[in-house]
């Protein structure tokens, strides 16, 4: 090999061209300090959704400046909310929670109280916030066109894949491979959130014995797809609800607006279609609209919904739902929880309490703790996996909103770092827009392969 590409961080932080030893040392450093380096990149992605689903304007300005400094793209999280939510839910007084299970009490602080009336009529919820019914979902696709899941996935991931494939085409068309091309490719892969390790694996593979030879964009995309599939295959695990538990208890956790309630609705639909009896527990007791949203999903999917008034104790509700689901012999109990930012210690404590109370009823429950991640939040999703994993014992992931972002590559970085099972991905608001995760399909879709 006659020339060597500079490492990504060497290019990012400038300085003279490194010799081979410095290059190796830097590469070692990269491999041993992924968190720190990622945090530098993270500047573009720390747009934490506020309880009303909007980023703090002051934070946005800082983050945009930081992002520009590292040449990263800034994408605001798209957490569409109900119109009737408070503009500044942070400022709302927190309700005092009482544990109906009797054993523990917990007083949350700064948890948003939803001022919306508890008796909110379903018709008053703006329709875009609710996923369409199965019939409406089918009608979303062009008339007469039967769209396969892979086509839907490809279409959903089109922003992520075109960010990659356009860049690949512009670099690799009719040029002989050299170090600068690999540097450019590495930058594109990292900006697409695939993670430093995967980006380096791809460029290393391409460089192997191919310098000074022409390499087509199609070949590069094939290598991209293969390397992504390698990382994702170990985590592509179906959610197994047939483990002899009755009810099989699934707890849904995650940051505000990441799609917990919608995912529960979509899952409920799938499970009902499989002939399973399902009960839904409206554990997001802070938002009347969330309870109502779940009630509508229950009606659509034939699942009983256990709900209480706004401000009620979520742990108490979970306990009651456990009891009722057991007495009624339902197959699956899906428990919703209020959205919470992972850095709010008190709210994370409340989540622990919900889990403790569930365990009083069945020490093995919850049998699955699913974390919903909004793909549009980019690198911040890594931090969410870390903290929710520690606090709530997350057993699997659901990545939503892959249709609204150019940063779907974050799933690859999460898989490489945490190795947690990815059960489902969401590419739209429709009931048919959530499917079990397939590593090969995702890899092909993101690389723009047919
Ligand atoms: N485009 C798109 N939108 C989605 C997807 N999944 C959920 N949404 C939308 O995201 C918004 C928030 O979804 P919810 O299910 O209410 O989120 P949540 O996590 O329950 O929200 P909180 O209860 O406030 O924490 C809704 O408008 C959903 O329709 C997806 O895969 N793609």
Image (cartoon, rainbow, N blue to C red):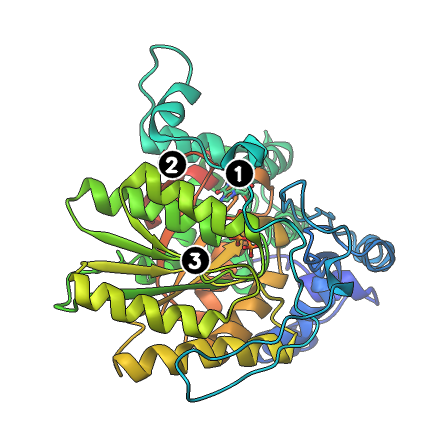
Which residue corresponds to mark 2? Answer: 431
Q: Residue furthest front?
A: 119
Residue 278 in the image, given as x and y percentages of width and height: 25, 53
Identify the residue at image location x=17%, y=44%: 274
**Horizontal side, residue 30 vs residue 265: left or right:** right
Residue 91 in the image, given as x and y percentages of width and height: 78, 64
Residue 314 visible, this orientation: yes
**Horizontal side, residue 428 vs residue 67: left or right:** left
**Horizontal side, residue 269 vs residue 281: left or right:** left
Of the numbered discs 2 and 3, the one sitting upstream in the chain is 3
Identify the residue at image location x=47%, y=75%: 389
Number of marks present in the image shown:
3
Identify the residue at image location x=41%, y=40%: 296
Q: Which mark is residue 121?
A: 1
SS label for mark 3 = loop
Placement of the N terminus among the 4 image quadrants: bottom right
Of the numbered discs 2 and 1, the one sitting upstream in the chain is 1
Q: Residue furthest left?
A: 244
């Amino acid at each position: 090999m006659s020339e060597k590409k500079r490492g990504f961080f060497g290019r990012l932080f400038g300085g003279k061209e490194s010799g081979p030893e410095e290059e190796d040392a830097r590469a070692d450093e990269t491999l041993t300090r992924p968190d720190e380096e990622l945090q530098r990149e993270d500047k573009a992605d720390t747009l934490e959704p506020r309880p009303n689903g909007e980023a703090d304007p002051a934070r946005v300005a800082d983050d945009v400046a930081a992002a520009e400094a590292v040449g990263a793209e800034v994408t605001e999280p798209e957490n569409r909310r109900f119109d009737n939510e408070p503009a500044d839910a942070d400022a709302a007084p927190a309700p005092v929670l009482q544990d109906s299970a009797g054993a523990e009490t917990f007083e949350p602080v700064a948890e948003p109280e939803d001022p919306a009336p508890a008796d909110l009529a379903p018709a008053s919820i703006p329709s875009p916030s609710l996923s369409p019914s199965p019939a409406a979902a089918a009608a979303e696709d062009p008339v007469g066109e039967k769209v396969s899941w892979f086509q839907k996935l490809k279409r959903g991931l089109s922003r992520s894949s075109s960010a990659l494939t356009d860049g690949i085409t512009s670099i690799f068309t009719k040029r002989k491979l050299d170090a600068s091309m690999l540097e450019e490719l590495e930058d594109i892969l990292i900006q697409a959130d695939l993670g430093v390790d995967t980006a380096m694996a791809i460029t290393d593979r391409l460089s192997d014995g191919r310098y000074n030879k022409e390499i087509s964009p199609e070949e590069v995309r094939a290598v991209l797809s293969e390397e992504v599939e390698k990382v994702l295959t170990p985590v592509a695990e179906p959610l197994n609800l047939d483990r002899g538990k009755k009810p099989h208890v699934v707890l849904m956790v995650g940051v505000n607006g990441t799609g917990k309630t919608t995912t529960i609705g979509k899952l409920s639909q799938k499970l009902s279609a499989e002939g399973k009896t399902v009960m839904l527990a409206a554990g997001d007791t802070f938002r009347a609209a969330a309870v109502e949203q779940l009630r509508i999903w229950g009606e659509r999917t034939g699942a009983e919904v256990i709900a209480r008034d706004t401000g009620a104790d979520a742990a108490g509700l979970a306990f009651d739902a456990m009891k009722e689901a057991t007495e009624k012999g339902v197959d699956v109990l899906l428990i919703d929880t209020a959205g919470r930012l992972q850095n709010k210690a008190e709210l994370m404590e409340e989540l622990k309490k919900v889990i403790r109370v569930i365990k009083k009823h069945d020490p093995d429950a919850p049998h699955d703790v699913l974390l919903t991640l909004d793909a549009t939040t980019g690198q911040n999703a890594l931090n969410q996996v870390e903290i929710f994993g520690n606090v709530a014992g997350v057993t699997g992931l659901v990545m939503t909103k892959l249709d609204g972002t150019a940063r779907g590559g974050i799933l690859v970085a999460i898989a490489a770092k945490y190795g947690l099972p990815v059960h489902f991905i969401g590419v739209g608001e429709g009931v048919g827009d959530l499917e079990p995760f397939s590593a090969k399909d995702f890899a092909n879709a993101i690389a723009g392969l047919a």
